Each structure stands twice: as structure tokens, then as C-alpha cells.
Amino acid sequence: MIGNGALGWCTLGLLAAAAALVPPTPAALAEFGAWAARPAALPFAWHALGDAERRGDAAEVFARAQQILRLLPRWADGQAAFAYRYALAASGTVDPPDAALRRLDAALAWLEAARATAGRREPDLLQAMAFLPEVAVRQQPGLEALLAPRGGAAGMADACYAELERRFPSAARREQRLYFAPVLAASLLGAGDLPRARSVLLAAIERAAAARDQTLAAPFRDRLGEVLRRLDGDRALDLAAVRADARMAPLLPHLR
């Protein structure tokens, strides 16, 4: 059996032979260099991120997260989770609205830039961008007024969904405005961020209550409420209905 080290040298040898037969383009070489560097760079980047989180510096955490995300450009769930964690990271019990706006703008700008390398996950980033202002205004008093010149949180969401429907036309896009929340909340739970996952779920419950088609929205709202109860520690709650709802599937691994 070939050991891991021998297998690695064999792989490099085959790559070298292939390069001799068909010289790679500069772009291909750059991509290979980035791929080869990731296993070496990622452990250090994760360690630095952990140190920043322990210090409680939201700006440094976001900067360290960006280093990781540059090494994993197609990790859309990670892009969304870290952007949300930064945008919703209050510095105190009452966060100044202008500080909240700066964080929101930085997070949205990061997600916008990440679209270029997201591939088939680009629609998920647009969904995350659409939902973020709505979650932020629930958490940050005074932020809605600062967003008024842009059409408010709802207007910003409409702009993102218009781009989503333009780039990826589908009859289901409007319905997905409501049903993307479990995906996003699951990403935050995967990052260990229960408070912001709760914010996402609460915003989705409010949105469901205001939906025109309550035949669809009411059961969805009820399932999200049950998810919140379990996350808040209600171990006696029967989750049969949650498990039976395919829209809740991303959350199930987090409902122990």
C-alpha cells in the first residue's frame, strides 16, 4: 500500500509530467498555487480567528474570518455566517446606530464581493444580503431611520431579490424570501452563534406573520417557533412536525 507521503510525491510527479506535456496558463498556475497553499495556511488562520474571538474584538474576528474565506472562496455558508456575525455584533447593550450602519455596510460589501467566486452558491449570497438588513433593524435601535434613504430594510431586500430574479429567474424566488431563514440560521448555529441564529429565526417569524398566503406561512411560522423553543432548552417539546417539514432540514443537526 502506498503511504500518504509517497502518494503525495506521486501526485506531484504526475502534475509535473502533465505540465511538461501541456504548459499551464498563468491563471491556472495561480489557482494551483492557491490550492496548494490552503492546507498549510488554514490551521494558522483558524487559530488566529479563535484568538480574536476569545478577545471579543468583532472587527478583528471579521478580519481573521476574511483571511479564511479568501482561502475558501466558494464556502457560501461561511461567507454568510461571518458577515452576519460581524454586522450584528453590538459593542454594548445599546449600540450607536451609525456604528451599526458601518458594520452592516461592511458586511454587505463583503458578501457582494464574494458573489464573484461563489459559483452555483451565488443565489444563497444574494438571499443572505436581502435578509441581513431586516435582521439588523430588529436588533439595532435607530438603524431603520438611517436606512430610510435607501428604501429601508424592505427596500434593500427588494433590490437584492430583483437582482436574484434577474440573474437566476425562477417561479419560486418570491417564495424563497421567506424560506431561506433555516439555511441561514443553520449556518450561524454551525459557527456556534446561537444569539444571531435566534435573531434570524425571530425575523423570519415576523415576516411569516405578515405574509399574504397564510396557508403556507402559518405552518412555517409554527415550525420556526418550535425550533426556537428547542434551542432555548425545551427538551420535552415534540419535534415530529419539525422533522417532517423539509424546509427545516438544515436545522435538524442542531436540535439535540
Image (cartoon, helix red, strand yellow):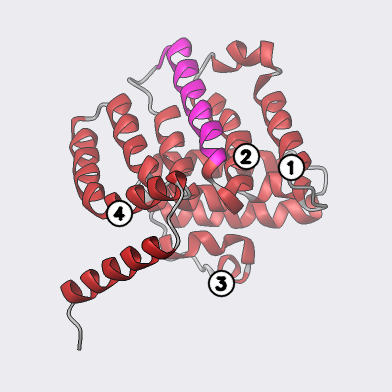
First reached walking from the N terminus: tag 1 or tag 3: 1
Q: Position of residue 161 (x, y in %)?
A: 72, 37
**Residue at point 56% right, 24% down?**
137
**Residue at point 52% right, 60% down?**
250
Relative side of 192 to 25, left or right: left
Closer to us: mark 3 or mark 4?
Answer: 4
* Cα distance in 3D space between marks 2 and 4: 29 Å
**What is the secondary structure assignment of the residue under circle 4?**
helix
**What is the secondary structure assignment of the residue under circle 3?**
helix
**Residue at point 56% right, 52% down?**
182
- The residue identified by callout 2 is 126
First reached walking from the N terminus: tag 1 or tag 2: 2
| Residue 240, numbered circle | 3
Q: Measured along the vertical axis of the image, is residue 229 above or below residue 105?
A: below
**Pointer 4: residues within 10 angstroms few (<14), some, or many (20+)?**
few
- The residue identified by callout 4 is 36
* Cα distance in 3D space between marks 1 and 3: 37 Å
Amino acid type at mark 1: Arg
Q: Is residue 94 visible?
A: yes
Q: Which residues are magenta?
A: 95-116
| Residue 167, numbered circle | 1
Q: Is residue 222 magenta?
A: no
| Residue 112, numbered circle | none
Q: State the residue in front, 179 or 19.
A: 19
Q: Measured along the vertical axis of the image, is residue 185 above or below residue 248?
A: above
* Cα distance in 3D space between marks 1 and 2: 10 Å
Amino acid type at mark 3: Ala
Closer to us: mark 1 or mark 4?
Answer: 4
Q: Are marks 1 and 3 in contact (CB under 8 Å)?
A: no
Closer to us: mark 2 or mark 4?
Answer: 4
Q: Are marks 3 and 4 in contact (CB under 8 Å)?
A: no
